[in-house]
Amino acid sequence: MFKKLRKRRSKKAGLSPGTLIHIGEQKTEYVELSVIDYNSDEAEFSKIDTPDKILKYIKNDNVSWLNVCGLHQPEIIDQIGHEFGIHSLVLEDILNTEQRPKVEIYDDYIFIVVKMLQYDEKKEGLDVEQLSLILGKNFVITFQEKEGDVFDRLREWIKKGKGRLRKKGADYLAYALVDAVVDHYFLVLEKFGDEIEKIEDNVYLEPDSDMVSEIQRIKSDMIFIRKSVWPLRESINLLMRDETPFIKEENIIFLRDLYDHTIQVIDTIEIFREMVSSLLDVYLSSISNRMNEVMKVLTIIATIFIPLTFIAGIYGMNFEYMPELKIPWAYPAVLIVCILIAIIMLIFFRRKKWL
């Protein structure tokens, strides 16, 4: 993972700041542009070919949401930046999918970066996508790495006029987008919670070596989620404290609610991290207990055979004058003695609760 990260970042070596290079994996074949233009009365959903066609939407009083799906063609991102007056350093950050979540406030817009996380059922792990967001006076631009997101419910609300979206401005749309990402963190954590419970049940009943890799994978995912949420909390706090014309006073209360959600996510992550760490300790203890049980059984068997081996060793000596060898019933008598010794020792171990 870190080798790939170094290789991606090395592509920027020697280049001047603001040079547009896509750093990350190409997750879609084509770059697709779509726009949702709406007001309190109607909403228009459209696909567009070139970024300049969005200008006809933002010149009216409606709220326009331009979504860019695919980041592997820097020339398209550069054209969008030219049409909307976005700084080249911001465009550089959009194309670098290794960015940490952050908020940057400019004179003409607000730049927001968040990590959109989903739980991959096939891989049983995280599917990570960077979401960059530009909030302007009456528009929002979102940059995604691939198709598929957590905004279907928002699109449905805009289409049917449900909730506050159609009655609010672009700042509320930006809040709703980030809130949808944060709310989906709870669904992702719920999946990890189910995994932790499953491992917790098995670690007591049937601990095996595969559990170590599963525990370490979940632990790594928890660290990544924490790294994604912790700076986001500070970014939301910055939006609440900083006076900017792009966020109305009436919508600050929604940012406070979003801030509380990030705190809840962080608390849940910390609980899961402690649970995962304790699971590893429980696994090691279970393996140690199983080994102790095996050693106890082997020790008891060896202890029982010590006197029997002693008796067999005496009568295995090649002395000529051993009176027992001439007695017809000596052999079964010795066997009976060996069996009695073994039974007596088993009874003794049982009373001592060693068995």
Image: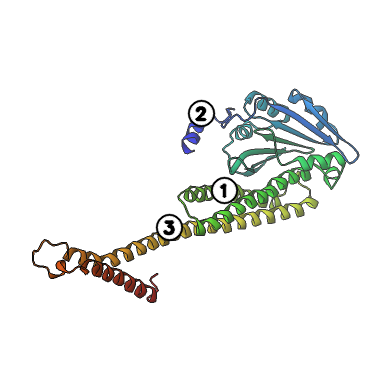
Would you place residue 81 above or below residue 350 in this image? above
With 151 as the anchor, is 190 left or right in this view?
left
Amino acid at circle 2: Lys
Q: Nearer the viewer, residue 90 or 3?
A: 3
* Residue located at (17% from left, 69% from top): 327
Would you place residue 215 above or below residue 6 in this image? below
- Quarter location, residue 89: top right
Would you place residue 209 above or below residue 15 in this image? below
Amino acid at circle 1: Lys
What percent of the width, then of the height, locates residue 300?
33, 66
With 6 as the anchor, is 165 left or right in this view?
right
> Counting residues from the N terminus, which is met first, the one under dot 3 or under dot 2?
2
> Counting residues from the N terminus, which is met first, the one under dot 2 or under dot 1?
2
Q: Nearer the viewer, residue 102 or 73?
A: 73
Q: Label 1: state its secondary structure.
A: helix
- Compute the Cα span from label 3 to label 2: 46 Å
Residue marked by disc 2: 11
What percent of the width, then of the height, locates residue 190?
65, 52
Would you place residue 224 above or below residue 345 in this image? above
With 335 as the anchor, is 350 left or right in this view?
right
- Quarter location, residue 292: bottom left
Q: Residues within 10 Å of mark 1 (few under 14, many from 20)?
A: some
Residue marked by disc 1: 227
Q: Residues within 10 Å of mark 3 (few under 14, many from 20)?
A: some
Mark linked to residue 287: 3
